[in-house]
Amino acid sequence: MKNIISVIFVLFIAAQFLYAVSVTIYNNDLALVRDTKNVKLTKGVQNIELDEVAAKIDPTSVLPKFLSNANKIKILEQNFDFDLVNTDKLLSKYIGETIEIERTGEDKRGKLTGKLLSAYGGLVVQNESKIVLNPQGEISLSKLPEDLKLKPTLIWLVESETEGNSQIEISYQTGGISWNADYVLVTNEKDTAADITGWVTINNNSGAVFKDAKLKLIAGDINRVSQNKYAQKRMMAPLMAEAAAVDSSFEEKSFFEYHMYELQRKSTLKDREIKQIQFISAKNIPVKKVFTYNADIDPVKIKITLDLKNSKENNLGIPLPKGRVRVSKYDSDSIEFIGEDSIDHTAKDAKLSINIGNAFDITGKKIQTNSKTEGKTSYQSFSINIKNSKNTSVDVNVEEMLNAWSNWEIKENSVPFVKKDKSTIEFSVNIPANTEKEIKYTVKYWWK
């Protein structure tokens, strides 16, 4: 008896797996849906209809596959019918047919029965004695026209050599579903450490409900061909988090040259619903508040960023998907919002810089003090003044963008600098409370 129960249980689990709806979501308005249905076949040529499909389906992507008796079933045609029921279409199908109108409101002349001559710009009905224009009331129709559907419907014309129940697996692409990553970062009172929580946000506007679906997220650069109304740009799907920092309800694995991120439980995606599922959580991540002045970006304001290293030593060390980061800060008795930024894909061990906003009490000013040109050589001198009105000292990084199209050399400088790239140098200065500091430098340019 126990063995029989065990076999039944295994078969039940297998059936649940077989008939599960699977939705693989990409992050740029695309999903791949796979569904399995029972159909009843008779011998000969017949239609099979499936009306539980997304309204934004790409019909050119549909792939039907019979799972039983496949060698005895031939698919002759495939159609996608999206001529759905509404008042105008129903009336247009009844042109030349008899309708009934139960007059309401002030018109108490009873029921009007006649042939519908037109439904455009108002009703025109002809009864036995006259033609009636724009009769008002409740319209009754005898039946629903066969070529109108209640839902978007896939229809297959198949020829079967057998009869009975069979299973058909249908896969198709649909628009209207996308996903992205959202992060919540909360810093401590001294801005030296932070906690981070990452969420997968799924937005379903496909026109379909996917009940108890297996959810998968594909990560990687998926190329798509731009063509007619299904044209879309090349998608940039994010690199997914590895198991070390991922919630246990998810499982990540390599798939082709991409990554697949699978939820380890079923979930229902309702139409017109935004669903969030937590996928990453890390605490006490070391962060550093950085002040940066770049006169080419803003001549006065000082940008504030929170910098951190995405390393295992800092309780992370995982590829972070691109997304929006909302940053808050612990106060003595509350948590207050201080800014937000969007981040690009960030590999493990890479630096992550989150733009918070601009400093209130620190400002900058840059002026050119001298300019001299001798043939193919030019000398440019500048003075940069950083003012700190805070009651505490601050460290400020001053970025200077040099002419990238010529050779250059710093001839004089009052503060040491580092070369960040071929056209950017950076000065780092400490400015005591309520003081100003000046940076002077001269750059030599020459052309060959």
Image (cartoon, rainbow, N blue to C red):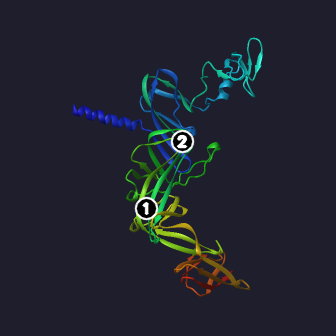
Report the amino acid beneath label 1: Ile
Q: Nearer the viewer, residue 8 or 407?
A: 8
- Say which quadrant the C terminus sits in: bottom right
- Say which quadrant the N terminus sits in: top left
Q: Which mark is residue 173?
A: 2
Label whose residue precedes the other's in the sequence (1 or 2)? 2
Q: Which mark is residue 34?
A: none
Q: Is residue 414 above or below residue 213?
A: below
Cα distance between the residues tagged 1 and 2: 30 Å
Displayed quadrant of residue 164:
top left
Q: Nearer the viewer, residue 312 or 305?
A: 305
Q: Is residue 425 above or below residue 18?
A: below
Report the amino acid beneath label 2: Gln
Q: Which residue is labeled 1 in the image?
A: 318
Residue plotted at (58% across, 40% down) = 56
Q: Is residue 256 above or below residue 347?
A: above
